[in-house]
Amino acid sequence: MRRRAWGQLLTTAWRMYTRRWPLFIGFGLVYLPVMLLATAAQWLVVTLADLTTLTGPDGDHNALTVLVVVLLGDTISLLAYVLVLAAVSRSLDTLARGGQPSLRDAARAVGHELGPLTGVSARIAVVVALLVIPVITAPLAVVYAVRRAFAVPVVMAEHRTVSGALRRSRELVRGRWWPVALLLVLVAGLGAVTGPLVGIVILLVSGGTSFWLINLIAGLVYAITIPYVALVISYQYADLTARAMSDDDRQPELVS
């Protein structure tokens, strides 16, 4: 498998996205029920805090409330991100093997690996959260997150355990941290903040607690953008694997 430059990787992912957009957006629609869950959680936070509005008595927006509800929704959306990335990884692997990917096949495969996927996601989330709390160790959270960014594709393609997938991802990124980090910031970062940014704008403009509307719009944005992000990450995983395995005939090859 050839190793792609940034432009080639982004173009290859875009071609695949446009060629099979109904499939990938179908994966992305998982964000809708997940964002409904986020809405329920945010409503609970507002209710328990006895907040009836997101604007203070002087008319100013309650910045802390905005921050809490947005971060809560973003945290819950991590669940959908993992599911979409896993489904996309499975679909590309199916194509590479000459098969035809489908929603049902991807759902079955993700369900089979749900244990390791949950373990990987939980461990990454906990470690990153613990590192972010003390400001001085926040940069280490970024380093850790980049090194473990490919753990989900590893689980789906190589069927490794939680520890094995995290270790494998770290090995793939070794010596390539900066290029990988820059790509993730460019693609995954933009994809991740698009939904919350749209939600914040709507939140500030509306001046109310329309969580359902905010999360519905954010979910629709994610449903369109995150599958492309997942494609880029999956192709990057394949390229890093090609570098690590060199001429090994067993290296995974993704269809482009």
Image: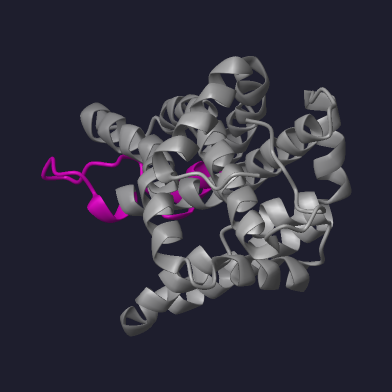
Q: Position of residue 246 (x, y in %)?
A: 67, 60
Q: Position of residue 242 (x, y in %)?
A: 65, 55
Is residue 168 shown left or right of residue 226?
right
Residue at horizontal 64%, vertical 31%? 33
- Indicate yes or no whether the magenta region holds residue 61: yes
Q: Nearer the viewer, residue 49 or 19?
A: 19
Residue 217 placement: quadrant: top left
Q: Which of 203 and 167 is in front in this view?
A: 167
In the rendered structure, which segment of residues is drawn in magenta? 40-65
Q: Can residue 77 be seen in the rendering of this structure? A: yes
Please state the total of marks drawn on the protein image: 0
Q: Can residue 219 be seen in the rendering of this structure? A: no
Residue at horizontal 71%, vertical 35%? 92
Is residue 50 shown left or right of residue 228?
left
Q: Point out the residue furthest to the front here.
A: 247
Residue at horizontal 51%, vertical 39%? 229
- Indicate yes or no whether the magenta region holds residue 127: no
Q: Which of 165 and 7 is in front in this view?
A: 7
Quarter of the picture containing the C terminus is top right
Quarter of the picture containing the N terminus is top right
Q: Position of residue 174 (x, y in %)?
A: 54, 72
Residue at horizontal 40%, vertical 35%? 195
Tell me, what colour scheme is on the image?
one colour
Is residue 160 shown left or right of residue 195?
right
